[in-house]
Amino acid sequence: MLDVIFSEDDQKSLERNEKTNKALPTRTALNLIRVNGDAKLSVKRSKMRASQNKSYLEQLLFGKG
């Protein structure tokens, strides 16, 4: 149904930029972890901590702390 409404089949940019568009949230998350995260934690541990600790997630997203 959404394909009919938005004519996604006719949009060539979806095919060309699909990999870039899908990778953007991942790159953004990794950059936020590197910039705002705890330097003592690995990226893997920072992701785990953010999934379990709301205040740490806010620190990553907004640079608080």
Image (cartoon, rainbow, N blue to C red):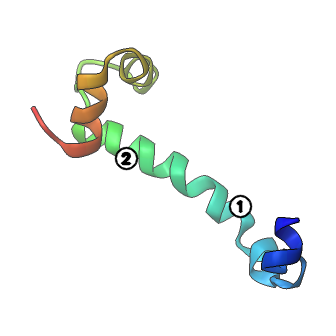
Indicate the position of residue 63 as horizontal and vertical percent values: 18, 42
Q: Secondary structure at mark 2?
A: helix
In which quadrant will I find the N terminus?
Answer: bottom right
Indicate the position of residue 30 as horizontal and vertical percent values: 43, 41
In the displayed structure image, the side of residue 41 where residue 65 appears, left or right: left
Indicate the position of residue 34 as horizontal and vertical percent values: 31, 39
Q: Secondary structure at mark 1?
A: helix
Residue found at x 82% / y 83% = 12
Quadrant in the picture for residue 14: bottom right
Q: Which residue is mark 1?
A: 19
In which quadrant will I find the C terminus?
Answer: top left
The Cα atoms of the two marked residues, 1 and 2, are separated by 18 Å
Nearer the observer, 42 or 24: 24
In the displayed structure image, the side of residue 59 where residue 46 appears, left or right: right
Residue 31, numbered circle: 2
Sequence order check, earlier mark of 1 and 2: 1
Local crowd size for mark 2, using a 10 Å CA cut-off: few (<14), some (14–19), many (≥20): some
Nearer the observer, 50 or 46: 50
Nearer the observer, 11 or 43: 11
Residue type, label 2: Asn
